[in-house]
Amino acid sequence: MQAALGILEVFGLTPAMIALDTMEKAAEVRLFQWELNDWSGVVLKMTGDVSALRSAIDAGHAVSEQLQARPTSTIINRPDDRAMAALKSPLETSAVLQQGTVKNPNYEIVGGKSEVTVADQSSQALGFIETQGFVAVFEAIDSACKAANVEVIGKEKLGGGYITVVIRGDVAAVKAAIDAGTARAATLGKVIAGHVIARPSAGVMSLLPKS
């Protein structure tokens, strides 16, 4: 039985990553599982004690509202063991999206260490460009890479035409790349989000898409 389970559901992968980063930095909580629904929503399941989860979920909900990600959240105290059969989903891969739709974090392999320290991440950042449509995101990532020295980590598809490309580099480079990429994408299609996470939390790092 888990001590408590905090659940935050948002619309879009980029807001989900931002919310996860915010929650892990707000309180002593850890990501339990990440799951997609069938309408471009992402569910983050967090564990910790009730007071820590309340602080974390409130912070994640607030930042998701600022991003207009339509958050819904709750905290389940001492979830019933029988209920865990539904609360914890088996790992799944979508044949349509060709990627995992349920993921468990692997904190043990983040950066090749048991945890990623603040010092390890002090000069690193992640950048997210999320669009509706491939043409916009492909042009965006090309412009981003031409604008600064960044590494493409990979891309995630959420359905409904929503695609997110993730880049990594030092903070200044990632900011420059995201600015250039989102500006280019806006001329070709719908930009859902363009965001930089400096010093990403261990949970965010553990969910990076495979390049």
Image (spheres, grey):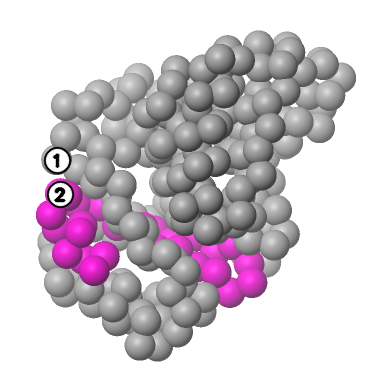
Where residue 167 sits, quadrant-wise, is bottom left
The kind of residue tagged 1 is Ser
State the residue at coordinates (25%, 38%).
199
Q: Are marks 2 and 1 in contact (CB under 8 Å)?
A: yes
Q: Does 7 appear above or below 95?
A: above
Dot placed on the residue nearer the N-terminal end, 2 or 1: 1
Residue drawn 46% across the image and 45% down it: 63
Question: The residue under label 2 is which amino acid type?
Answer: Asp
Circle 1 packing at 10 Å, graded few (<14), some (14-19), many (20+), is few
Q: Name the residue under label 2.
A: 170
Residue at position x 47%, y 69% from top?
192
Q: In this view, does 60 lie to the left or right of 177?
A: right
Please name the residue shown 63% across and 67% down the image: 159
* Label 2 environment density (alpha carbons within 10 Å; few <14, some 14–19, many ≥20): some
In the displayed structure, 47 sits above or below 163; it is: above
* 126 horizontally vs 160: left or right: left
Position of residue 74 measured from the top left corner of the image (x, y, whole percent)? 68, 32
Counting labels gives 2
| Residue span colored magenta | 154-179
- Please give the residue where the numbered disc 1 appears in the rendered image: 123
Q: Where is residue 48 in the image (x, y as percent from the top left)?
A: 56, 16
66 is within the stretch colored magenta: no
Quadrant of residue 165 within the rendered picture: bottom left
